Image: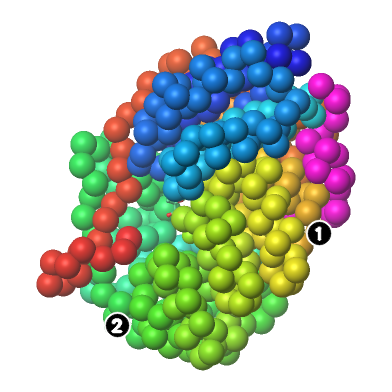
């Protein structure tokens, strides 16, 4: 099964997506997601200018060899751009191998370890009434686990709030659905960690009082706290029994999680900005996290994330794969196939894509009664309508950034 064509398709139906389409000499097509929010064209060029020409003529069945060829052969290793590019090739080859075997991909990854994947959705509100309405609407949509994001008094626009103001070009698109605003420059937002720390525990108390003790609740601190503040928040949230507190502090310094772990038993999830098994070495071997948050798209594909999950299994750490709308339907399908097969599955993030995106990407992926299933079509179960994609050319879009009250740039 020789690779005959490797094309990079950039489209912007509801947001920008980068997809690698690999076609073999016997006419099979494999797809891989290479979308890196706010830096899409960097990966598109890495693939089109440097990788795609090297794939032509290769045996599509040799997935591990191709992975090592691109990782070691590329000399410059790791990092979000390289690992997103390698991921797209890897997933496209797994899609091809499963289609050649006429099996859904999860069957090649060891078969199903469960009937479906528990998924969580994003509820948010600037205030409690808006938040409660958002939780109710997610429960009505069938979600059985809910991420809670809240506005903070005194702060104009913060991460994760659906009703935040958006750019003119993003009118009608929920802010939390697409934080990367279509604009020539990134939007500046404000932040105050002490105001946030004073406000959030009370919100979780109110949500528990309103919705009871059982509902799994998640929260994303989105990399904004120091290790000490993260320990304070984790401790303050213990009475509300969170499923997880995510990205409580930037993870570049993996050891900083030791301090957080020493002070709170609130489960911790980290990894959406980590790109390789080496980025997880300390936080897994010292069990400083409970959930691996990587996306297949940003972590070297199914081959590498499966390796990370096998490593994590030794330490009873589970998956909590990243699944916002900037992971394309191809990336979501890959996460669902891997999540269905691995033993140490925890939960899957799932934000629904828009109608234009669903028109570009055909999917057998389904969300029923709170559970995700990738479907039983051969391969990933995703198709790409190139003509439809062609209707939506790339649009410049940037994720926002933060400044503190004194003007200091802060983690967004
Ligand atoms: C977030 C993402 O879903 C999450 O947990 O952290 O929404 C993140 O902000 C975006 O994926 C950035 O592109
Ligand atoms: Mg997150």
**Residue segment shown in magenta:** 100-118
> At 53% from the left edge and 89% from the top edge, which residue is drawn?
262
Residue 62 in sight here: yes
Q: Which quadrant would residue 98 be assigned to in this image?
A: top right
Q: Which residue is mark 2?
A: 194
Position of the C terminus, as image quadrant, is bottom left
The prevailing secondary structure element of the residues shown in magenta is loop
The stretch drawn in magenta includes residue 110 = yes
Q: Residues within 10 Å of mark 1 (few under 14, many from 20)?
A: some
Tell me if the residue at label 2 has its CB under 8 Å from ligand 2.
no
Q: Considering only vertical position in the picture, is 335 above or below 271?
A: above
Foreground pick, 60 / 396: 60
> At 54% from the left edge and 20% from the top edge, which residue is drawn?
54
Element type where label 1 sits in the image: loop
Q: Considering only vertical position in the picture, is 207 above or below 293?
A: below
> Which is nearer the N-term, disc 1 or disc 2?
2
- Percent across and percent down for residue 280 are 56, 63
- Percent across and percent down for residue 246 are 51, 68
Position of the N terminus, as image quadrant, is top right
Farthest left residue in view = 406
- Percent across and percent down for residue 93 are 68, 28
Element type where label 2 sits in the image: helix
The stretch drawn in magenta includes residue 117 = yes
Q: Which residue is mark 1?
A: 343
Q: Considering only vertical position in the picture, is 394 above or below 169?
A: above
Foreground pick, 59 / 293: 59
> At 26% from the left edge and 66% from the top edge, which residue is drawn?
410
- Percent across and percent down for residue 174 are 41, 47
> At 29% from the left edge and 52% from the top edge, which residue is drawn?
400
Quick check: 320 left or right of 157? right
């Amino acid at each position: 099964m020789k690779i005959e064509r490797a094309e990079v398709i950039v489209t912007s139906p509801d947001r920008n997506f980068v997809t690698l389409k690999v076609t073999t000499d016997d006419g099979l097509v494999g797809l891989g997601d290479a979308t890196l929010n706010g830096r899409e064209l960097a990966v598109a060029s890495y693939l089109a200018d440097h990788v795609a020409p090297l794939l032509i003529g290769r045996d599509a069945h040799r997935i591990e060899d191709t992975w090592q060829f691109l990782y070691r052969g590329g000399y410059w290793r790791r990092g979000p751009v390289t690992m997103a590019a390698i991921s797209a090739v890897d997933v496209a080859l797994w899609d091809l191998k499963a289609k050649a075997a006429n099996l859904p991909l999860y069957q090649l990854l060891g078969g199903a370890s469960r009937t479906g994947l528990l998924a969580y959705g994003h509820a948010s509100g600037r205030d409690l009434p808006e938040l409660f309405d958002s939780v109710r609407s997610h429960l009505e949509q069938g979600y059985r686990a809910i991420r809670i994001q809240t506005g903070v008094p005194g702060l104009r626009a913060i991460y994760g709030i659906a009703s935040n103001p958006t750019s003119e070009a993003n009118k009608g698109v929920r802010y939390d659905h697409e934080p990367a605003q279509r604009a020539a420059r990134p939007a500046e937002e404000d932040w105050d960690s002490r105001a946030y720390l004073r406000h959030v525990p009370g919100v979780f108390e109110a949500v528990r009082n309103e919705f009871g003790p059982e509902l799994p609740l998640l929260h994303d601190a989105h990399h904004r706290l120091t290790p000490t503040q993260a320990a304070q928040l984790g401790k303050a949230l213990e009475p509300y029994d969170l499923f997880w507190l995510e990205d409580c502090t930037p993870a570049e310094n993996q050891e900083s999680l030791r301090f957080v772990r020493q002070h709170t038993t609130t489960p911790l999830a980290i990894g959406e900005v980590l790109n390789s098994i080496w980025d997880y070495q300390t936080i897994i071997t010292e069990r400083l996290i409970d959930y691996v948050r990587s996306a297949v798209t940003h972590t070297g594909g199914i081959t590498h994330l499966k390796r990370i999950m096998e490593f994590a299994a030794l330490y009873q750490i589970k998956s909590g794969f990243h699944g916002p709308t900037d992971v394309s339907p191809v990336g979501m399908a890959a996460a669902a196939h891997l999540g269905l097969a691995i033993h140490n599955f925890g939960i899957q993030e799932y934000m629904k894509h828009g109608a234009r995106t669903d028109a570009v990407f055909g999917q057998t992926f389904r969300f029923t009664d709170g559970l995700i299933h990738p479907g039983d079509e051969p391969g990933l179960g995703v198709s790409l309508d190139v003509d439809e994609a062609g209707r939506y050319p790339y649009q410049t879009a940037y994720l926002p950034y933060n400044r503190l009250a004194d003007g200091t740039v802060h983690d967004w």
